[in-house]
Every structure is written in structure tokens, then in C-alpha cells.
Amino acid sequence: MSRVRHFLRDDDLSPADQDLVLDAAARLAEAPHLASEALRSDAIGLLFEKPSLRTRVSSEVACARLGATPVHLRTDELQLSRGETAEDSVRVLVGYLSLLMARVREHGFLEDLARPDVLPIVNGLSDRFHPLQSLADLLTLRQELGTLAGRRMAFVGDGNNVASSLMLASAMAGLGLVVATPEAYRPPEDVVDRAIELAAASGAEVRLTTDPVDAVKEADAVYTDVWTSMGQEDEEARRRRDLWPYQVNSELIAQAPASAIVLHCLPAHRGDEITDDVLDSERSRVFGQAHNRLPATAALFLFLLEPSLAGRLEEVPWDGDLP
Ligand code: CP
Ligand code: NVA
């Protein structure tokens, strides 16, 4: 039994906890000041091994909104770069910090950081998962569609970290998901198996296809992400060639229901996985989706550090604050 709560992958939250975090995020999206003093005695570490716009800025502003002190960290400036272990580093950091969010090259590094089980570790993107992104995505879908259960989404492109997180998060929320990729670009087998297991409990349908039209034809939302993720730059030419038939363009969107919206975690490689006319169309919700990273991250930090307050946000009057 873990002593502290970590969020390395979407299913580190139970389906009920994911709902609670989304409720808190929805409330914070409407009333950003509600929990402005909630984490005033906490410092939160923000560690980046890879570039970031959205995760970096939204997590720092989430700290400010909750009264916490953000502390930016880079692996190459820590003794990690000279051989200090992740475990020893965390045993030290827990004396200063209440939580550490980390964007890492390898998911295993996050597991090493979580192993001492003394400091909550949050995945700010790894090669396997991007669960903070999925929280913002589900929040966006709730705002746009009203409910998640019984709705359907299509993910078209590379079965990457974003696709893997969406599979788990959607399955827990009862949101149907069809993932269209070439055979060789499917999400990892263990993730697919886990998503199917979670979907069986929620009643959602999760399935894979190689046919993008099959994926989008009944979709309430069509989601795509870059074909070449950070760290895969050497494979860019092959990926562009293999994934070209999976481009989200106006011909593909014409096969989706007229009401279907378009999502992308951003940054987009315009003209590759998505065309300008789709990204800039009336169906696109990508900038609101990016803005939702802020309340989603604030809600997750609050849930991990002050779970009873996160659960009580609904009760706080509009002009009030949490005690
Ligand atoms: N979507 C996302 O995580 O963006 P950044 O890489 O800019 O943080
Ligand atoms: N799949 C992308 C997501 C970026 C937010 C990557 O890992 O680079």
C-alpha cells in the first residue's frame, strides 16, 4: 500500500477520483480564485527534461492560483546529472517540497522518483503517458458535450503517450474511444489490455482500427497529436511516410458527424497530422483545450495534497474561499 498518492498514469486515480478531480477542475475553470490560499504552506517542484509551453506555464500558474511556491528544476542542474540516484534525490527533496511534477524522457525515471514513496510524483509527460493532458481533455469534452458516458471519441494518428493516456482516462470515464493507427503504430499491448479491462467496468467501448474513416464516422470528437514525439526526431521521415494516410484534414472530417469537434493536445505540426483548415475551423476547440490545462492541473495538485478540500469545492460560495 502506497503511503502517498502518485499520478504517473491515468489509472493511478480510481474512476471515482478522476470524476472528483474533473468536478474540481470544472469549478476552478469557472471560479479560478476559489482555492487561492489552499496550498499556501506548500512548495511544488516542476522538473523538465524536455521542452514545454503548456505544461510549464500552466503548472507554474496553477501553483500561484493555489498559493503554493513553484520551484523550477532541470536535471542537468541537479546532482542527478553526476550520478546521485533518483531515490536519494527524492529523500532529500521531501524536506523542501510537498509534490514533484516531472516531465521525463523515460517513464522508468518517474517510477524511480516514486519508489521511496515519500513525495507525491506527478507525470508531466513521459514517453509512455501524458495523464495531465487527458484530465484537461476530459474537462474540455465535459464542457462541450455535457457528459462523457456514452459519448465517443476518435484518436487518429500515432499510438503514442497521448493516445495511451486517452485510452485509460476515457475507459475510466465511460467515454467510447476508437484509436485509428497503422498496425505498427498501435498503442502498447499492456495499455490496450488495461483500457479494455477498465472499459468493461465502465461500459465504454474501446477499440483499435487501421481505418481512420471507421474511427471518425460516429465520433463526437476527433483527436490527433504529432506523428513524431519528442525524442523520436531520428524517425521523422519514416513516420511522416507511414502516417500520411492518417492526416486529419477536411476530407476525413467530412466523414465525421456534422457536430463533431476537433481536439489536439498541441503543439501541432500544421500540414502534417492536421491541416490548417481543420485546426482553424469552427469545429476546433484546441485553444480552449490548452487553456483547460490550468484548472485541470490545479485540481490535481489540490486533490493530491488536500483531498478533502478538492472534494468540497462545490460547496464554496462563488465569492468565498476555502478556509
Ligand atoms: N500539450 C503539452 O503538453 O504541451 P507542452 O509540451 O507545451 O507542455
Ligand atoms: N506526443 C507528444 C506530446 C507533446 C505534448 C510528445 O511526446 O512530444
Image: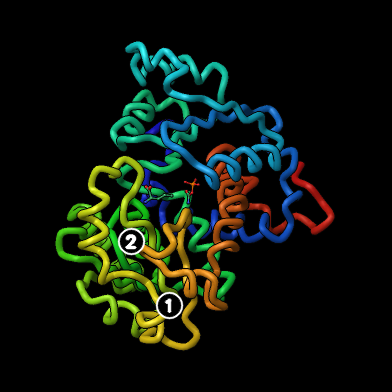
Q: x%, y% of residue 206?
A: 28, 70
| Residue name at image x 30 percent, y 35 percent | 106
Q: x%, y% of residue 125?
A: 41, 43
What's the image's color scheme?
A: rainbow
Query: Does ligand 2 reach within 8 Å of label 2's beta carbon?
Result: no
| Residue name at image x 32 percent, y 32 percent | 111
Q: Looking at the image, is mark 1 or mark 2 earlier in the sequence? A: 1
Near mark 2 (Cα within 10 A), the count class, few <14, some 14-19 or many ≥20, is: many
The answer, for residue 1, to whether it is visible in the render is no
Q: Is residue 6 above or below residue 316?
A: above
Label 1: which secondary element: loop
| Residue name at image x 30 percent, y 54 percent | 160
For residue 129, the mark is none
Is the Cβ of the residue at disc 1 closer than 8 Å to that at disc 2? no
Q: x%, y% of residue 201?
A: 31, 66
Q: How many marks?
A: 2
Q: Which residue sits furthest left?
A: 183
Label 2: which secondary element: helix
| Residue name at image x 15 percent, y 59 percent | 184
Q: CA distance from mark 1 to mark 2?
A: 14 Å
Name the foreground residue: 103 vs 168: 103
> Horizontally, is 71 left or right of 241 in the view?
right
Residue under label 1:
151
Residue under label 2:
167
Tell me the kind of residue under disc 1: Arg
Tell me the kind of residue under disc 2: Met
Name the foreground residue: 284 vs 179: 284
Q: Which residue sits furthest right?
A: 319
